[in-house]
Image (cartoon, rainbow, N blue to C red):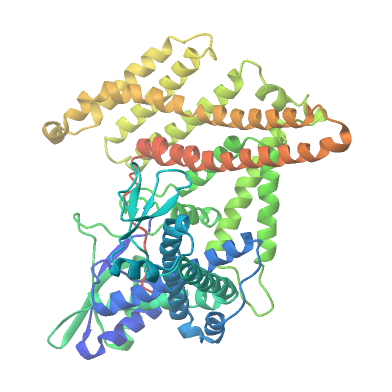
Amino acid sequence: MIVEMKHLTLLCVAREGVKALESLRDIGCVHLDLSSADSPDFASAKEELADAERAVRIVAKAAREAARDVGEPAPKGEVAARLENAKSAALVEEILKVDAERQAAEDEAEALRQTVRKYAPFGDFDPALAESLRKSGVPVRLAVDGGHPPQGKACFGEELPEGWAEVPLPSERLSATQARLAAAEARAAACRAALAEANARVSTIEARYPALKDQVAFAAARDVLATQGEVSWVTGWVPVDSVPRLRAKAVSHGWGILLREVRPDETPPTLIRPPKLFRPVAALFKGLGIAPGYTEADVSVPFMCYFSLFFAMLVGDGGYGAIILALTVWGWVKTRPVADKRHRPAIVRSWLTLLTVFSSATVIWGILSNTWFGAGLPFANDWATVKWLADPSYNNMMLLCFTIGASHLILARVWSGISMINDRVCLSQFGWAGIVFFMYWTTCSIVGIFSSFPSWLYWELGVSLALVFGFTLKGNELKSRGIELGMLPLNVMSCLGDIISYVRLFAVGLASVKVAQNFNDMAVGLDLPLWIKWLPLVLILLVGHGLNFAMAGLSILVHAVRLNTLEFSNHKGISWAGYAFAPFKKH
């Protein structure tokens, strides 16, 4: 369900404003709108957090580059000592300084490389000698041709040959420039090496993230704390079931609180509280960055159920599901509670639970369809589900996809109708459910799954259209929203497209299986002696199945999310235009 919100105005004496915010943060049940914060303190706190995150990225990148570098490691020097001796609080600042020195050294080295390339055709001559010749009345000019590599020569008074271009005299010998280049490259290498070694201390920076985020949030809360005379106040949103706790805190601290209902022109944050079994889906919503509007429905239960089914069918291979399940079990083990009573963060538990459900569904699909890394188990070929799903005409798989789609969309319409059962508009939702069913039968007939089209379906369509046309709008809405009825034919046809859209479950899953099969055939079919065949065979299988595995993950993000957040949500009336409830609390 979506938890009911109350609008809160909290008042306190002005001198107690900061303490009131600290106490409010300890309660952790009030959502403050911090978007208007713009004070120097807020900017400074935000910059400190950004610097810490940037420092972590810098040392992580340096460590990756060092791992790829097979050359001799740069010798430790003064730069590395600075980072080793830096205190935890000053480590971020020191990392940023070293990175700035690295960038300056690399920029200098690049400029010197260009200079070396420019004067390399002339060799290591002394520019002072050329200058003395000029003073003696012998003009000396340098010129290069357009060849690759370019040729250079010195001209003593004569005109430049055709096609040659003049080059200004350098400020120093080529050897001196090359020495400065070597020094700049050495400085850059020393900085990179020091940053790579600092990666071992990155945990001390990451450990400060929660405190830095709290610092940013508190600075923003101080910005939105309004003061006039001797009174300070702050406004926000509080879940209705947290009101008693807030009242008790207000009594003990001498606050004044004003609670009121949500106004029609206000948009409170959305706090989703699904049934306990389906609570992990909130982590999926957070990961996708979506939230239903406050006045919309909580679709957590059907979202998780159908997403699990979509996940299994799109991956389409029980072997891949087994890999995900094994990795998930490993995650459960690695994050298990330990002796000092540390527990898994709620977000980690939620994701592990989701992956357990999704991967188990994929393994079950692999059992039903007998697909394991693009191959099948010989003893399972005669199972009824395997034979049914392996129908050469693919009619059974398409029937399954269209049936899933119809059930998904009809559920949305019937649910909407039941939720507004006291309003005659509910009849239009039941009418839309009837239209979806008619389009389901039509789709199956078009592709040849159903050989006959019962005449009673036309009567069903007529009744459904009458319900939609007659009860979508009330009499006083015809003038302002009458255009919606004019769009009815297009909306009816879009139902056909929505049903057909679910065939992607079959198409993408089949493509995944076929790709796996082709890589298997490619590996097994190598015409090589057995003693050397095993190595390319293993490489082809690893690369092929790895690529297929990655593409399966991409298809889930694209197709499984779309079917829930677009097709289903459009029929349910979910716009996903809300924003998540984020209480002001200490992390």
Q: Nearer the viewer, residue 416 or 142?
A: 142
Please tell me which residue is depicted at 71% across the width and 22% down the height of the picture.
387
Q: Is residue 548 visible?
A: yes
- Residue 483: give x, y in percent of width and height: 17, 28
- Residue 402: give x, y in percent of width and height: 51, 25
- Residue 191: give x, y in percent of width and height: 52, 73
Q: From this viewpoint, which residue is outermost toward the bottom?
A: 15
Q: Is 249 situated left or right of 322 in this image?
A: left
> Is residue 71 shown above or below 382?
below
Q: From this viewpoint, which residue is outermost toward the front?
A: 137
Residue 569 is drawn in which quadrant?
top left
Q: Nearer the viewer, residue 69 or 455?
A: 69
Q: Is 335 situated left or right of 227 in this image?
A: right
Q: Is residue 1 visible?
A: no
Q: Is 303 situated left or right of 322 in this image?
A: left
> Can you say which quadrant of the picture contains the N terminus?
bottom left
> Is residue 178 shown above or below 554?
below
- Residue 429: give x, y in percent of width and height: 33, 32
> Can you say which quadrant of the picture contains the C terminus?
bottom left
Number of residue marks? 0
Q: Is 389 situated left or right of 155 in this image?
A: right
> Is residue 234 shown above or below 276?
below
Q: Nearer the viewer, residue 94 or 515?
A: 94
Residue 432 is drawn in which quadrant?
top left
